[in-house]
Amino acid sequence: MVDIRERASDEVRPDRKDRPRRKSVTFLLVVATAAFLAAAGLRLLGIDGTRYTIATTALIPYITAAGVLLGVLALLLRRWAIGTVVLLVAAVLVAAVAPRVFPDSRPNGVGFTVRVMAANVLFGTADAEALVRIAREHRVDVLTLQELTPEMVADLDRAGLGELLPHRVFAPEPGASGAGIASRFPLTARTLAAPISLGQAGALVDLPGEDMEVLSVHPMPPVVTEGPDQWKRDMAGLPEPDHDGLVRVLAGDFNATLDHVALRRLLNQGYVDAADQVGAGLEPTWPSGGGVWPPPVAIDHVLVDGRCPVDDFDVVDIPGSDHRAVIARFVVPQP
């Protein structure tokens, strides 16, 4: 009898020893699941919220991938309920994020092909010669600039921007408040958005045939210490597309990804994101340099009128800037 009891005790003891480990694993999975569901909820419920939640929403592509891995791990560890819930929510996020890597069908459209480039020049410290060279190589027609300083204007002129894109609407300022538009075609300054804390230049571009309006976009970053209220006001003040009038293009540093409510509002009004249209919607634009922290995200965009078929989109490094430039090629329909 003693041998039988001792043998039975020995058989039970290992299972008892495993219980704390299993509880610890379950606890860690529950904590990770709660964090994932909280982050996913921001995107699925359409909450921009505070500067911290806005920063979290910018990471939704990464969070989506982490959710898939977490769900698979939970199932492998036989935490069926956790794994099922996580994978169901992750699947909804995948449905929102994955289409950005696949090109949309190109609508039929006949008109004038335009190449628009947007570049944040980081307080005017970007390499002007490299910027002009890239604009020349990509045959850019319209260039929008953010954080344009008087010194940067002089550098661009020395680099030959005036010969390449002779028409301009510039409002240079020290620091981050300057903005500008340079074009191969004649420009007329236009006020397309309400005044904001950072400069946003607007212009009518006199294209052969139908003209178009362009706004150099640069709302206040939402993660500043003062909070995101100014960013929200700036984004809300961006103009809607003019469905019955001229094609309107918003190009620049939006400080927002396609997962933020403030940017999705513009898309719901009738703009299309050029990168998303050609399957480059996850191509990061900030910070440049290929580092892993902060995780690179896509906050620079070219939003075009939904009537404009988009043919190409490129993201290019600009030495001296923490942003990569974005270049979109699309068709402005002609009457």
Image: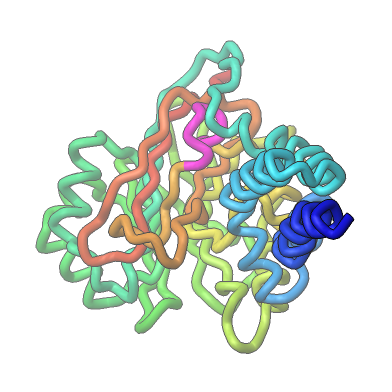
Horizontal arrangement in the rendering, residue 138 relative to residue 24 (left or right): left
- With 90 as the anchor, is 326 left or right in this view? left
Can you give x and y, in whole percent of width and height, for residue 263 in the image? 67, 53
Looking at the rendering, in which quadrant would you find the C terminus? top right
| Relative horizontal placement of residue 113, taking residue 256 as reference (left or right) | left
Residue 22 in view (yes/no)? no
Q: Position of residue 174 (x, y in %)?
A: 35, 83
Quadrant in the rendering for residue 33? bottom right
Q: Quadrant of residue 169?
A: bottom left
- Specify whether residue 275 is painted magenta: yes
The image quadrant of residue 124 is: bottom left
Residue 122 among those drawn in magenta: no
Identify which residue, 270 or 192, lies in the foreground.
Answer: 270
Which residue is drawn at the image coordinates 33% and 61% (left, top)? 291
Residue 218, image x and y in percent? 52, 65
**Nearer the observer, 241 or 315:** 315
> Is 34 above or below relative to 133?
below
Vertical arrangement, residue 313 with respect to residue 130, above or below: above
Picture residue at 73% right of the left edge, 75% below the top = 50
Q: How many callouts does the rendering have? A: 0
- Foreground residue, 334 or 260? 260
Q: Whole-percent x and y of residue 330?
A: 46, 28
Vertical placement of 149 versus 156: above or below? below
- Magenta residues, start to end: 274-282
- In the image, what residue occupies the spot 58% across and 33% down? 100
